Amino acid sequence: TVVLMKASSLKIMDRKLFGAGSSDPYVRLACEGDLAKSTTKQKDLEPTWEEVFTFAAFDERASLSLQMYDHDDIGSDDFMGSVDVPLASLRDKKLVRRSLQLSNDAGEIDVFLCWRTSPHNVAKLPNEVHELVQGQEKYKSQALNELIVCPIRATRLIGVDSHLGGGPKTSDPYVVCDVDGLRMKTSHKQKTCRPEWLEVLKLPVDGYSRASLSVEVWDHNLGKDVFLGKCTVDLAKYEDRKGRRRWRTLTDERGMLD
């Protein structure tokens, strides 16, 4: 949660022939692919907003980006300055108030910040997964022969599809799970870099100790699909039949998969 309070000592972007110049500032906010924008304050170098923004954020390696712009009626808006706040600095779940210095000596921005657990953003596993995990005790003496994979969601995926109306790029992502050449995939989610699948994939697997699971994320297209990233899981760690839920980093830091 971000409470945008005010800014001070902002840079003059709109200069006049006579009299003091001013700016028409607004703030663009971004966190893990989610975007938001404040209202614009006309001719104000000491603006007050007192506006609240909420982002679904899961990765403490990500940052909250605050970018100050000057609105122009004609032409593109002028970038004034920016500041990034690492989510790791907010991991104690406490509400803090910070005065942040913008780049380019553009001024200072005053915000309240709190990174907390919201029940609205907790993805619940399908009942089938719980039942499968809980029911394994009676099969303890038998050989392992099936792998259950539940792709839950992803965040910070790269966007590869542009849109006619402009705006940030998105993707139509789906997950492919591969064990020794046996492949299964989820459905694809349209126009998002933060998909949620909650789908159960069942792969027949013998010999967990020598097998590995490859999990790939692809962008669906009418033509050729585009590779977005992958991670690999050593199945030897799962021979105890216990289900585990983990966030995994995709190759080249191209996002996170839950």
Image (cartoon, rainbow, N blue to C red):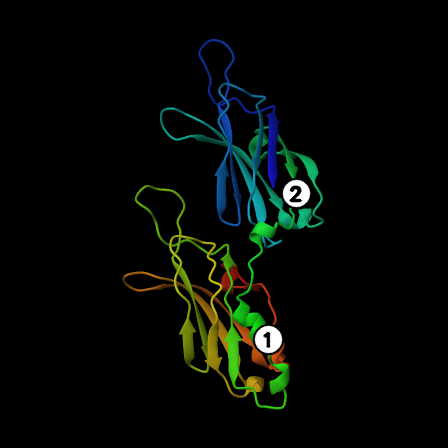
The secondary element bearing badge 1 is classed as helix
Q: Which residue is mark 1?
A: 133
Mark 2 packing: few (<14 Cα in 10 Å), some, or many (20+)? some
Q: Quadrant of the N terminus?
A: top right
The residue that appears at 42% across and 30% down in the rendered structure is: 77
Q: Are marks 2 and 1 in contact (CB under 8 Å)?
A: no
Nearest the camera: 56 or 15? 56
- Above or below, comparing residue 193 to residue 96 in the picture: below
Residue 133: x percent and y percent?
A: 59, 75
The residue that appears at 54% across and 68% down in the rendered structure is: 127
Nearest the camera: 86 or 115? 115
Give the tally of numbered discs.
2
Q: From this viewpoint, which residue is outermost toward the left?
A: 223
Amino acid type for the residue under numbered disc 1: Val
Residue 22: x percent and y percent?
A: 51, 18
- Above or below, comparing residue 174 to residue 146 in the picture: above
- Above or below, comparing residue 69 to residue 19 in the picture: below
Residue 222: x percent and y percent?
A: 28, 61
Q: Compute the Cα span from label 2 to label 1.
A: 35 Å
Residue 147: x percent and y percent?
A: 52, 79
The residue that appears at 44% across and 27% down in the rendered structure is: 71
Q: Quadrant of the C terminus?
A: bottom right
Amino acid type for the residue under numbered disc 2: Cys
Mark 1 packing: few (<14 Cα in 10 Å), some, or many (20+)? some
Q: Nearer the viewer, mark 2 or mark 1?
A: 1
Would you identify the image quadrant in which residue 139 lies? bottom right
Q: Which residue is mark 2?
A: 114
| Picture disc at residue 75 | none
Would you identify the image quadrant in which residue 61 lies? bottom right
The residue that appears at 58% across and 56% down in the rendered structure is: 122
